[in-house]
Amino acid sequence: MKTVIITGSSRGIGYAAAKYFGLRGWQIVINSCHDINSLKQAEINLKQEGISVLAVPGDIGNPDFWKALVDKTIRHFGSIDCMINNAAISHIGLLTDMTDSEWLTLINTNLNSLFYCAKTVLPVMLSKKRGRIINITSVWGEAGASCEVAYSASKGGVIAFTKALAKELAPSHICVNALSLGMFDTEMNACFSCEDKAMITEEIPADRMGEPEEAAKMLFLIAEAPEYLTGQIIRLDGGWI
């Protein structure tokens, strides 16, 4: 059986992906940092679906956490076949109002965590000459968004990181791709009012926000795609950008 680690998977897109992969025979490692109760409930729910799941709470912005995550995964499931870097935080407001601490925390969580991940997960994949890494980015990493400069910068970094690492790992049969998401109906966007969401939806040709299950299905397709698919930024945004 294949094993996938999905960060930020106590709810939203991460949880939808865990359920989608699990129902198709994958072993699942789920993670959350701040909402431990939701993580425990997610583990219970997935087990009730007959899914083999391991919950590992911890901060992806802490390099030491990654060693613990990998060690626990290997002990429990024996392999890491796919890594989905889904966890992220956002910040909305004028850049000039953002504190140094807020900037550093966001960049550490959204971008530095990919480095910590690669340093610890890749030795496992390189030893077997196979593996998939999928990074979640955003259309704002491609186009930029006013009042979301830090978030846009971090997600732009994810795109460059993905393309470069894919070239580095292609000879080792390890694929690295990114899923670039538009506006999805998740708690990350709960900060927007109904009026704000309606205004944004009017700009989306599909005339709606995406559903977490749609992102989950696309993540699965990328994970199961031919090895020749690597270094790609696959946009899922209803035709928005």
Image (cartoon, rainbow, N blue to C red):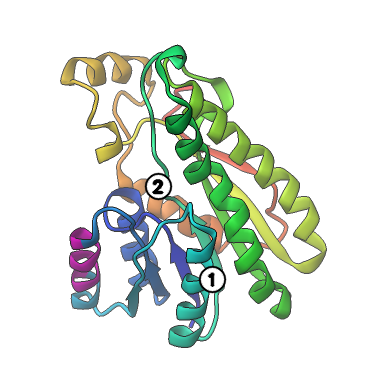
Quadrant in which residue 54 is drawn: bottom left
Residue 212 vs 27, above or below: the answer is above
Amino acid type, mark 2: Ala
Report the front residue among 107 and 17: 107
Residue 174: % across, % down: 70, 64
Q: Residues within 10 Å of mark 2 (few under 14, many from 20)?
A: many
Q: Secondary structure at mark 2?
A: helix
Please give the name of the residue rendered at 24% of the width and 27% of the height, measured from the top-left corner.
191
Residue 42 among those drawn in magenta:
yes
Quadrant in which residue 130 is drawn: bottom right
Residue 113: % across, % down: 54, 51
Residue 55: image tag: none
The range drawn in magenta is 37-45
The mark nearer the N terminus, 2 or 1, is 1
Quadrant in which residue 67 is drawn: bottom right
Residue 237 seen by the camera: no
Residue 215: image tag: 2
Judged from this view, the residue extending furthest toward the front is 100
Q: Residues within 10 Å of mark 1 (few under 14, many from 20)?
A: some
Please give the name of the residue rendered at 71% of the width and 44% of the height, measured from the top-left corner.
163
Residue 67: image tag: 1
